[in-house]
Image (tube, rainbow, N blue to C red):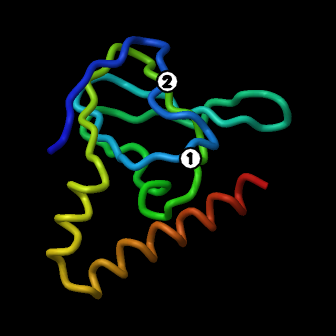
Amino acid sequence: MSNEFGLAKGDALVREGAFSNSLFLLKEGTLEIKKRHGGKEISLGHIQAGELVGEISFLTQEPRSATIVAATNCVIVEIPSEVFNKILKGLPPWFQSLIKNLALRLRKTSSKINT
Protein backbone atom coordinates (compact mmCIF):
# COMPACT_ATOMS: atom_id res chain seq x y z
CA MET A 1 0.00 0.00 0.00
CA SER A 2 1.24 3.52 -0.78
CA ASN A 3 1.73 6.12 1.92
CA GLU A 4 0.72 9.78 1.60
CA PHE A 5 2.52 12.47 3.61
CA GLY A 6 3.27 16.19 3.69
CA LEU A 7 6.60 17.87 3.14
CA ALA A 8 7.21 21.44 4.33
CA LYS A 9 8.99 24.02 2.15
CA GLY A 10 12.76 23.49 2.46
CA ASP A 11 12.56 19.88 3.63
CA ALA A 12 14.49 17.26 1.68
CA LEU A 13 12.60 14.32 0.19
CA VAL A 14 15.75 12.42 -0.88
CA ARG A 15 19.45 13.13 -0.60
CA GLU A 16 22.10 12.71 -3.27
CA GLY A 17 24.06 9.49 -2.69
CA ALA A 18 21.39 7.84 -0.52
CA PHE A 19 19.71 4.53 -1.32
CA SER A 20 15.95 4.04 -1.21
CA ASN A 21 13.34 1.34 -1.61
CA SER A 22 10.65 3.77 -2.74
CA LEU A 23 9.69 6.09 -5.52
CA PHE A 24 7.39 9.04 -5.09
CA LEU A 25 4.49 10.77 -6.81
CA LEU A 26 4.23 14.51 -6.21
CA LYS A 27 0.52 15.03 -5.61
CA GLU A 28 0.62 18.74 -4.72
CA GLY A 29 3.30 21.43 -4.72
CA THR A 30 6.69 21.88 -6.37
CA LEU A 31 10.00 20.15 -5.72
CA GLU A 32 13.47 21.39 -6.67
CA ILE A 33 16.25 19.12 -7.97
CA LYS A 34 19.69 20.01 -6.57
CA LYS A 35 23.09 18.46 -7.26
CA ARG A 36 26.56 18.95 -5.81
CA HIS A 37 29.06 20.04 -8.46
CA GLY A 38 32.52 21.46 -7.85
CA GLY A 39 31.86 22.01 -4.16
CA LYS A 40 28.64 23.92 -4.85
CA GLU A 41 25.00 22.92 -4.88
CA ILE A 42 23.31 23.83 -8.16
CA SER A 43 19.65 23.75 -9.15
CA LEU A 44 18.84 21.40 -12.03
CA GLY A 45 15.13 22.13 -12.30
CA HIS A 46 11.74 21.57 -10.75
CA ILE A 47 9.23 18.77 -10.45
CA GLN A 48 5.55 19.66 -10.68
CA ALA A 49 2.43 17.99 -9.29
CA GLY A 50 1.62 14.77 -11.14
CA GLU A 51 5.25 13.83 -11.78
CA LEU A 52 7.20 10.87 -10.39
CA VAL A 53 10.34 11.42 -8.34
CA GLY A 54 13.23 9.04 -7.72
CA GLU A 55 12.23 6.51 -10.35
CA ILE A 56 15.67 6.11 -11.94
CA SER A 57 17.49 5.24 -8.71
CA PHE A 58 14.58 3.08 -7.68
CA LEU A 59 14.67 1.06 -10.90
CA THR A 60 18.47 0.85 -11.22
CA GLN A 61 19.06 0.13 -7.50
CA GLU A 62 21.80 2.80 -7.49
CA PRO A 63 22.30 5.76 -5.14
CA ARG A 64 20.22 8.88 -5.68
CA SER A 65 21.86 11.15 -8.25
CA ALA A 66 20.47 14.39 -6.78
CA THR A 67 18.85 15.89 -3.70
CA ILE A 68 15.15 16.71 -3.98
CA VAL A 69 13.89 19.57 -1.79
CA ALA A 70 10.39 20.98 -1.35
CA ALA A 71 10.23 24.38 -3.09
CA THR A 72 6.70 24.79 -1.65
CA ASN A 73 4.66 22.80 0.82
CA CYS A 74 4.00 19.44 -0.84
CA VAL A 75 1.87 16.34 -0.63
CA ILE A 76 3.80 13.20 -1.57
CA VAL A 77 2.64 9.66 -2.27
CA GLU A 78 5.34 7.10 -1.46
CA ILE A 79 5.28 3.92 -3.54
CA PRO A 80 7.32 1.22 -1.78
CA SER A 81 9.22 -1.38 -3.78
CA GLU A 82 6.87 -4.16 -2.63
CA VAL A 83 3.88 -2.38 -4.18
CA PHE A 84 5.72 -1.50 -7.40
CA ASN A 85 7.26 -4.96 -7.82
CA LYS A 86 3.89 -6.63 -7.31
CA ILE A 87 2.48 -4.62 -10.21
CA LEU A 88 5.63 -5.05 -12.32
CA LYS A 89 5.52 -8.84 -11.97
CA GLY A 90 2.06 -8.81 -13.55
CA LEU A 91 3.48 -7.27 -16.74
CA PRO A 92 5.03 -9.26 -19.61
CA PRO A 93 8.78 -9.95 -19.16
CA TRP A 94 9.65 -7.86 -22.23
CA PHE A 95 7.89 -4.84 -20.70
CA GLN A 96 9.71 -5.34 -17.40
CA SER A 97 12.99 -5.40 -19.34
CA LEU A 98 12.03 -2.28 -21.29
CA ILE A 99 11.37 -0.29 -18.11
CA LYS A 100 14.67 -1.32 -16.49
CA ASN A 101 16.73 -0.79 -19.67
CA LEU A 102 15.30 2.68 -20.22
CA ALA A 103 16.15 3.61 -16.64
CA LEU A 104 19.72 2.32 -17.02
CA ARG A 105 20.25 4.18 -20.30
CA LEU A 106 18.90 7.41 -18.84
CA ARG A 107 21.20 7.05 -15.82
CA LYS A 108 24.24 6.47 -18.10
CA THR A 109 23.35 9.46 -20.26
CA SER A 110 22.85 11.70 -17.21
CA SER A 111 26.19 10.67 -15.73
CA LYS A 112 27.97 11.53 -19.01
CA ILE A 113 26.37 14.97 -19.08
CA ASN A 114 27.28 15.65 -15.44
CA THR A 115 30.99 14.83 -15.81
Tell me where residue 34 sits by quadrant.
top right
In terms of secondary structure, where does tag 1 sit? loop
29 relative to 35 in the view: left or right:
left
> How packed is label 2: few (under 14 Cα within 10 Å), some, or many (20 or more)?
some
Q: How many marks?
A: 2
Residue 36 lies, with reference to residue 28, above or below; the image says: below
Image mark for residue 64 = 1
Residue 75 lies, with reference to residue 99, above or below; the image says: above
Q: Quadrant of the C terminus?
A: bottom right
List x then y, in percent, for residue 87: 17, 65
Seen at 22% across and 31% down, the residue is 27
Q: Earlier in the sequence, mark 2 or mark 1?
A: 2
Seen at 36% across and 79% down, the residue is 98
Q: Residue furthest bottom?
A: 94
Tell me where residue 91 sits by quadrant.
bottom left
Q: Which residue is mark 2?
A: 12
Seen at 28% across and 38% down, the residue is 78
- Give the residue type that dot 2 points to: Ala
Tell me where residue 18 sits by quadrant.
top right
9 relative to 16 in the view: left or right:
left
- Give the residue type that dot 1 points to: Arg
Residue 85 lies, with reference to residue 78, above or below; the image says: below
| Residues at marks 2 and 1, CA–CA distance in whole angstroms | 13 Å
Image mark for residue 52 = none
Out of 94 and 47, give the one closest to the viewer. Answer: 94
Out of 76 and 85, give the one closest to the viewer. Answer: 85
List x then y, in percent, for residue 20: 46, 46
Residue 20 lies, with reference to residue 88, above or below; the image says: above
